[in-house]
Image (cartoon, grey):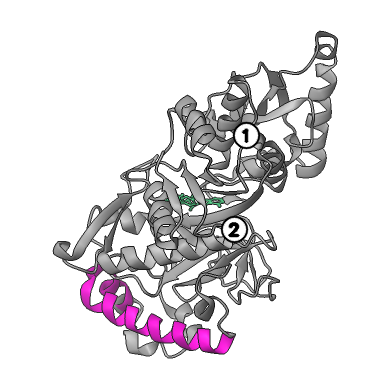
Amino acid sequence: MIYDIDFETMPREALEAIQLRRLQSTLENVYAKVPFYQKKFKEAGLVPGDIRSLKDLSLLPFTTKQDLRDNYPYGMFAVPMESVVRIHASSGTTGSPTVVGYTRRDIDTWSNLMARALSAGGATRGDIIHNAYGYGLFTGGLGVHYGAEKLGASVIPVSGGNTKRQIVIMKDFGPTILTATPSYTLHLAEVAKEMGFSLADLNFKFGIFGAEPWSENMRKELEETLGIDAVDIYGLSEVMGPGVAIECHEAKNGLHIFEDHFIPEIIDPITEEILPYGETGELVFTSITKEAFPIIRYRTRDITSLHPEPCICGRTHIRMKRVSGRTDDMLIIRGVNVFPSQIESVLMKSSDTTPHYQLVVDRENNLDTLTVKVEVSETLFADEIRMLQNTEKKISKDIKEYLGVSAKVMLVEPKSIARSEGKAVRVIDNRKR
Ligand code: DLL
């Protein structure tokens, strides 16, 4: 179902007229209210009135994560604190976290967009949504929650963690939609199995998975394990939270970006040059309806491409390809660029291993080394264990063939890699010590 038929199926020309109007008013607003933007615009010799078409957006300077850190915690807010009703923050593994704020209208906008997103992902009013995204400073839990309520579905605000209890709830409450990170979903499925049943035997119809990169092969695995259709949802705190873009369950082929609220661009991360549709680069977003924390040309560091072709679902909003990784997650192993999700794709092809893996990068004698730790499946019989050496060799060969990088593959015991209750930690890079 299309939640907001007028906006989501709007002809391109009308959509662009709205985008321009909203962009211009956002620019006037940030120029007047946020000293950071006023300074940046002045340095570029621009005033908001210079932006007369959507193309002119490219004249404006970029905003980076570092800019947000420099203005920690509230320096980028465009409204006084008495207008802010909610604060979230990104986890910030390095440096200070990024703090974002929402006015009451921002929460309304976000709830509406999440209602749109959940609908695109297959949810309807009659559904029961088991929401296992973390509640708290992370935007996942509350973002999905407000959208589910807006849609009129029943939401179970279970959050991440307490896995066994979650499984009991899943069994007893009969949820029809699961919202969680793909890695936590795998963990849920594994614990259910230990408790003696399969999630595929429950009532789930759809899974709405995101907040971390996951591969097409992981989609297949999750769909089989849960007996569902799985769609990809994308978002980031700096731009809003979940619900910036989502796949429709009809096509499951690229994520529609809600362009009446966010303008996407793809740039070459090194030269900063704007790339045409279809080419892969770094995603950049400008928000055009936010009040408390508007953001102009934000460099997300996420790697994807944009595709304007019409979609079978009827939505006219442009699609982005699933995010393959972040520029800062990209591993450079002896000069070869590798994303963890590409390794995942190769691993998922082997039937002797599980989707639980971790990449360990190190440096020996000044040479980068990559070790891929992957758990073997518990179902292997003793005589098959002897064959494992072959499996290691086979995966290593596949990685070399598909990605052009040499990797040592280490099969490890079931359950020896730490499970995540939110975003998985896929890479341990000892070179950075
Ligand atoms: O992860 C928001 C979210 C919550 C999205 C729940 C989807 C579902 P942050 O914690 O600020 O916000 O992290 C944002 O996570 O820049 C991407 O690198 C990554 N990310 C989010 N969704 C996807 C996805 C939330 N579907 C950062 N595929 C983003 C790949 C994703 N990466």
Residue that appears at 55% across and 57% down: 123
Residue 211, relative to residue 235: is it above or below? above
How many numbered marks have been drawn onto this rendered protein structure?
Answer: 2
Residue 348, percent from left and from top: 74, 36
The label number, if any, that marks residue 122 in the structure image? 2
What kind of element bears circle 1? helix
Whether ligand 1 has any atom under 8 Å from the Cβ at mark 2 is answered as no
Q: Quadrant of the N terminus?
A: bottom right
Residue 320 in the figure: left or right of residue 162 = right
What kind of element bears circle 2? loop
Q: Residue furthest left?
A: 82
Residue 58, percent from left and from top: 48, 78
Q: Is residue 13 magenta?
A: yes
Secondary structure mostly seen in the magenta stretch: helix
Label 2, label 1: how far apart the Cα atoms are:
18 Å
Residue that appears at 39% across and 82% down: 22
Can residue 428 be seen?
A: yes
Circle 1 packing at 10 Å, graded few (<14), some (14-19), many (20+), is many
Q: Amino acid at mark 2?
A: Gly
Residue 394 in the figure: left or right of residue 16 = right
Viewer-side residue, 201 vs 78: 201
The magenta span reads 12-41
Residue that appears at 85% across and 16% down: 387
Quadrant of residue 268 in the image?
bottom right
